[in-house]
């Protein structure tokens, strides 16, 4: 599922500007379409969280 910056912000509970900065910096993987809008794959966001949780469990 592809999400916009706004949808991703709502999903993550972040301010839209914060999400935009994370996308621009490459911390959230996204693709910019020809119309200038960014799209984020939900499964990539979920994958980031899965990886982070594995790291946390490994460190404890």
Image (tube, rainbow, N blue to C red):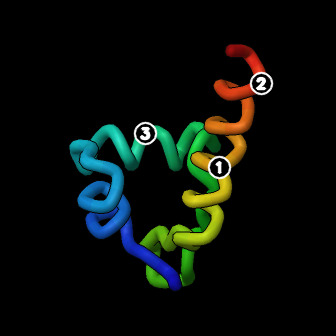
For numbered disc 3, what is the local secondary structure?
helix
Give the distance between the C-alpha atoms of the residues marked 2 and 3, in whole angstroms.
29 Å
Pick the front one: 53 or 45: 53
Pick the front one: 13 or 17: 13
Residue 21, compared with residue 9, is above or below; it is above
Residue furthest right as drawn: 58
Considering only order in the chain, which callout, 1 or 2, is on the residue closer to the N terminus? Answer: 1
Residue 28, compared with residue 3, is above or below; it is above
Tell me the tag on residue 21: 3
Residue furthest top as drawn: 60
* Residue 43 percent coordinates (x, y): 61, 70
Q: Nearer the viewer, mark 2 or mark 1?
A: 2
* Residue 45 percent coordinates (x, y): 56, 58
Considering only order in the chain, which callout, 3 or 1, is on the residue closer to the N terminus? Answer: 3
Which quadrant of the figure has residue 33?
bottom right
* Residue 8 percent coordinates (x, y): 37, 62
Q: Residues within 10 Å of mark 1 (few under 14, many from 20)?
A: few
Q: Nearer the viewer, mark 1 or mark 3?
A: 1
Tell me the tag on residue 58: 2
For numbered disc 1, what is the local secondary structure?
helix
Q: Residue at x 24, y 59 (%)?
A: 10
Locate the C terminus and report the quarter of the image it occupies. Answer: top right
Tell me the tag on residue 50: 1
Which quadrant of the figure has residue 25?
top right
Q: Residue at x 27, y 64 (%)?
A: 6
* Residue 27 percent coordinates (x, y): 60, 40
Pick the front one: 36 or 57: 57
Considering only order in the chain, which callout, 3 or 2, is on the residue closer to the N terminus? Answer: 3
Is there a contact, CB below 8 Å, between mark 2 and mark 3? no
Is there a contact, CB below 8 Å, between mark 1 and mark 3? no
Q: Residue at x 45, y 73 (%)?
A: 36
């Amino acid at each position: 599922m592809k999400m916009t910056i706004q949808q991703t912000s709502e999903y993550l509970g972040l301010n839209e500007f914060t999400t935009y900065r994370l996308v621009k910096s490459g911390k959230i993987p996204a693709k910019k379409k020809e119309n200038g809008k960014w799209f984020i794959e939900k499964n990539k966001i979920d994958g980031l969280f899965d990886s982070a949780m594995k790291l946390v469990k490994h460190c404890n």
